[in-house]
Image: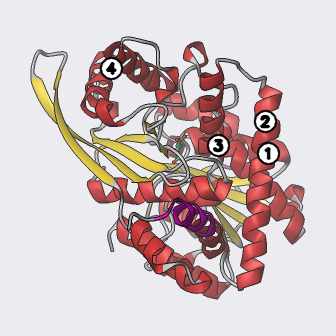
Amino acid sequence: MSLFENTLAQIKQASAIMKLNPTVEKILSNPHRILEVTFPVKMDNGNIEVFKGFRVQHNNARGPYKGGIRFHPQVDMGEVMALSAWMTIKCAVANIPLGGGKGGVIVDPKKLSPAELERLSRAYIRSINRIVGPDEDVPAPDVYTTPQIMAWMVDEYSKIQGRNVLGMLTGKPLAVGGSLGRADSTSQGGIYVLEEVCKEKGIDPKKATVAVQGFGNAGANVAHMLMDMGFKVVAVSDSKGGLYSADGLDTRIVEKCKTEKGSVNNCAVGNAKAISNSDLLALPCDVLFLCAMENQITAENADKVQAKMILELANGPVTPEADAILAKKGIAVIPDILANSGGVTVSYFELVQNKANFYWTAEEVDTRLRKIMVDGWKNVSANAEKYACTYRQAAFITALKRLEDAILARGFEN
Ligand code: GLU
């Protein structure tokens, strides 16, 4: 199954449970627009290399297309299509007035110098500039893209337009129209959902263990937050391997070590020992946080999962086949489209602040983020009960109902 087929399977499942309007289902099963671009970039050695990128605009019934840009060697059009559809659904779960889009460039940014990365970022935004803008399609960071990359892109776009257009993308540095709280908003949003889940299921953080797959922006931040809440973080991992300690890891020391030694896998001191990524996914623990890439829990390894619950900060880490196996085993999955929607929610706040040219305090951002995440959980949890379905199906139902309302109210051309 391709990643987009996974998304279609998820829409289909929820649609069957809630009896979604079939035309709406058909509309949401196809992206509005797919743009594929190639563009040349001058390398530091004087050679010109040609890169390929995409921007997919999935649906804008509820507001401008919205979604990040991924720089990764494994990017392909099917992946960007899936990610764009999940953005449509995610914004509808959070009930923010935005649609879904996604971009990607096939590149390993770790192999580029800062100057090459800047030229590539500017060249990509020039290639897609005709279809993006604050009221059309608003990009943001995703895997391996950063606030600095957003700053180059907003600068390039503003030069093309001949005026400052800060709201053409989000996730910018504070110095150029970024929002307080955006940097750790994905993790913070996930924590607000987790707090509600713990209340509902009677989990005491001080007596619970967690494992965190992925130690990038979302994974490292969430690991620190979990440790600060009293959870015992028994394992973390990155793309090169993992680290385990039955006594719990000090995640800030692990992060420092990763910066020095390149991977958490090289940080085995004291009671901590190196483990593999697949070991981490099979560890017995209360909550397994998936903060890396898609397709991590599949039909092959779902049976080995011993965590009591999974929370997805990555997009699409559990396949539909794995979902069915986990549901049978009674392992609850708090799905990406709810759990990681804190990122796009604060992106929305950033866009609002750019439009008003008036900036909020950290407390204002945080209070509004918490409310959206708690409301999101309440809606999803209520639908899970009403339809006796999984949290993912309930989150899709929550979103699809809102999308159906918007699409039907706008009407079809006759
Ligand atoms: N890339 C993030 C996501 O997948 C954030 C998107 C945004 O802020 O627009 O949700």
Disc marking residue 345: 3
**Mark 4 sits on what residue?**
118
Assess whether mark 3 and mark 2 are in contact (beta carbons under 8 angstroms): no
Select label 3 or label 4 by which is in front: 3
> Residue at the location (14% across, 16% down)?
45
Find residue 366 and name its label.
2
Distance CA(mark 3)–CA(mark 4): 27 Å
Residue type, numbered disc 1: Arg
Q: Earlier in the sequence, mark 1 or mark 4?
A: 4
Packing grade of label 1 (10 A; few <14, some 14-19, many >=20) is some
Q: Residue at x 40, y 60 (%)?
A: 82
Q: Nearer the viewer, residue 41 or 266?
A: 41
Q: Nearer the viewer, residue 331 or 375?
A: 375
Name the residue tied to disc 1: 370
Farthest-out residue, left: 47
CB under 8 Å between discs 1 and 4: no
Magenta stretch: residue 407 in it? yes
The answer to the question of whether label 2 and label 1 lie on touching residues, with beta carbons closer than 8 A, is yes
Q: Which mark is residue 405?
A: none
Residue 383, horizontal then vertical, whole percent = 73, 75
Specify the quadrant that holds the C terminus: bottom left
**Among numbered discs 3 and 4, the one appearing first in the sequence:** 4
- Disc 3 is placed on an element classified as helix
Residue 243 seen in this snapshot: no
Q: Is mark 4 within 8 Å of ligand 1?
A: no
Badge 4 crowding class, 10 Å Cα cut-off, few under 14, some 14 to 19, many 20 or more, is some
